[in-house]
């Protein structure tokens, strides 16, 4: 039996994406006609809500089937745009965060045999026919190695080969939408960053390197657990890890846990981010809540390290240099710093410059000493911040999303949403003083060697690669 290619061909996947876009656009046009015929604001509001829910269903169903880069883009939307969409639409899109539609077990077995060899597959006892999780790049099955339970992540066939075609099509769609708005924003850098990150995520040898790096950093940590990889049962398309039992973070929150338990988890996640960015310069940039598990003894299991990125010491110094300006610098100085750092195009006119300053000041508002401890569910702050960001994005004509900040700020935004769901209040002034006001001595970025997929032709090919510092 040949492994199904999951709409691998450029024509098939492009056709699916274009069909999805056409269906969404068709509903939008129908809605606009309906708005003209509606007589009351209530009717218009109800119809628009129904439209957004219908469009979210189309998006979720289509991207779940396509998987790969296309589904990953939908996951980013479900996290990054959650504050801009109605709750009904967010609830549907959130399905992309944890699960996609699984592929047949026979296809999984074929991948395992291709990557590991028949003998290694035979050594995986009790391999579950149903996946315990399925997402954009691969799905996870449980098994045993001897007496030890393991999780086996198997990459969908054809996913790595589809990245270029998926991103080219998404880029064409985005460029078309921008042309309608008559904004000459260049997205080349954004899609180059997406391509680099997705290629890393599709290389499970790279993820194994990242896991070992996190295990090294957190080996003595009392709260975090990082699963150990099994190199003899792993390759560029198969990753076998120690099994961690527990509840996904979202389910754990719904129990619900006590305020003390929620605060402990929230503060640990904040502390981890500070270490990742400021100390290590090595950040797991995927904030999907499904990447965190709360174990029965209250520890936090960390999962999915494919989206780890390096940030140099110079980049981190420049980042904090901009942040340090915000509380006291003039508007002109903030604009100039934003242009110098590459987050604002110098061609922008007065209105986007003014809104840029407001947006930057809103970003540091949670650290204001007058409002501590900061309540992450503060509806007034959320409403104000959303409106400023929305207004800023509406008036931009030249500024593209800064490629080096796309995934870093995605992590920050996702972390903020997790803390909001945890419904905690934390004194953030302590973090501000440690991160910004205290002179920081940066560790140089750890540069991991990126194993090539061709090195996975034999079982155990990803055994212990060297890690070098620059």
Image (tube, rainbow, N blue to C red):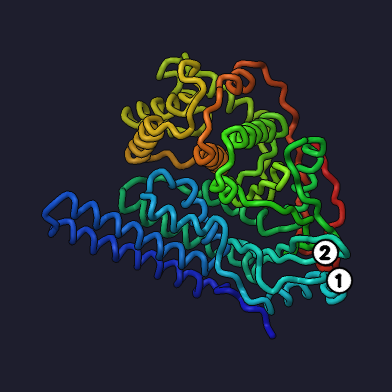
Residue at 54% x, 39% y is 422
Residue 404 appears in view? no
Q: Position of residue 164 (x, y in %)?
A: 57, 62
Q: Secondary structure at mark 2?
A: helix
Q: Position of residue 391 (x, y in %)?
A: 33, 36
Give the position of the C terminus as an image quadrant. top right
Give whichever of discs 1 and 2 has the lower sequence position: 1
Judge whether 458 appears above or below 424 on screen: below
Which image quadrant is residue 91 in?
A: bottom left
Which residue is nearer to you in this view: 375 or 13?
375
What residue sits right under mark 2 in the picture? 233
Viewer-nearest residue: 293 or 398: 293
Relative depth, front residue between 295 and 273:
295
Q: Quadrant of residue 355?
A: top left
Q: Along the horizontal axis of the image, is 394 left or right of 123?
A: left
The quarter of the image holding the N terminus is bottom right
Q: Is residue 240 rendered to the left or right of residue 35?
A: right
**Residue marked by disc 1:** 123
**Disc 1 to disc 2: CB gap under 8 Å:** yes
Measure how far apart labels 1 and 2 are at the Cα level.
9 Å
The answer to which image quadrant residue 317 occupies is top right
Give the label, 1 or 2, closer to the camera: 1
């Amino acid at each position: 039996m040949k492994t199904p290619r999951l709409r691998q061909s450029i024509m098939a996947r492009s056709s699916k994406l274009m069909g999805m876009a056409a269906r969404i656009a068709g509903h939008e046009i129908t809605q606009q006609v309906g708005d003209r015929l509606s007589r009351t604001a209530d009717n218009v509001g109800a119809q628009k809500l129904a439209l957004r829910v219908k469009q979210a269903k189309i998006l979720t169903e289509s991207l779940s089937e396509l998987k790969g880069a296309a589904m990953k883009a939908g996951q980013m939307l479900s996290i990054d745009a959650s504050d801009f969409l109605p709750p009904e639409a967010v609830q549907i899109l959130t399905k992309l965060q944890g699960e996609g539609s699984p592929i047949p077990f026979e296809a999984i077995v074929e991948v395992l045999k291709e990557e590991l060899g028949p003998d290694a597959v035979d050594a995986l006892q009790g391999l579950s026919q149903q996946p315990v999780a399925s997402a954009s790049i691969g799905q996870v099955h449980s098994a045993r190695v001897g007496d030890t339970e393991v999780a086996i992540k198997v990459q969908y066939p054809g996913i790595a080969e589809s990245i270029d075609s998926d991103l080219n099509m998404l880029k064409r769609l985005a460029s078309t939408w921008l042309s309608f708005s008559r904004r000459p924003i260049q997205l080349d850098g954004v899609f180059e960053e997406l391509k680099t990150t997705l290629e890393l995520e599709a290389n499970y040898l790279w993820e194994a390197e990242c896991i070992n790096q996190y295990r090294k950093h957190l080996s003595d940590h009392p709260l975090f657990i990082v699963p150990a990889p099994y190199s003899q049962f792993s390759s560029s398309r198969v990753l076998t890890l120690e099994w961690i039992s527990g509840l996904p973070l979202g389910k754990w929150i719904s129990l619900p846990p006590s305020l003390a338990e929620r605060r402990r988890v929230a503060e640990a996640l904040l502390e981890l981010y500070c270490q990742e960015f400021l100390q290590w310069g090595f950040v797991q940039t995927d904030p999907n809540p499904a990447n965190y598990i709360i174990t029965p003894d209250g520890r936090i299991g960390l999962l999915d390290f494919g989206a780890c990125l390096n940030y140099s010491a110079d980049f981190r110094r420049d980042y904090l240099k901009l942040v340090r300006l915000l509380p006291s610098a003039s508007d002109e100085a903030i604009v100039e710093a934003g242009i110098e750092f590459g987050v604002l195009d110098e061609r922008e006119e007065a209105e986007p410059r003014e809104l840029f300053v407001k947006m930057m000041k809103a970003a540091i508002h949670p650290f204001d000493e007058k409002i501590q401890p900061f309540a992450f569910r503060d509806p007034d702050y959320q409403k104000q911040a959303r409106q400023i960001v929305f207004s800023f994005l509406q008036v931009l004509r030249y500024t593209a999303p800064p490629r080096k900040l796309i995934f870093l700020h995605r992590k920050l935004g996702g972390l903020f949403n997790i803390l909001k769901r945890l419904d905690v209040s934390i004194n953030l002034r302590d973090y501000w003083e440690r991160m910004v006001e205290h002179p920081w001595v940066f560790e140089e970025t750890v540069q991991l060697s990126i194993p090539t997929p061709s090195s996975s032709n034999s079982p155990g090919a990803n055994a212990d690669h060297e890690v070098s510092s620059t």
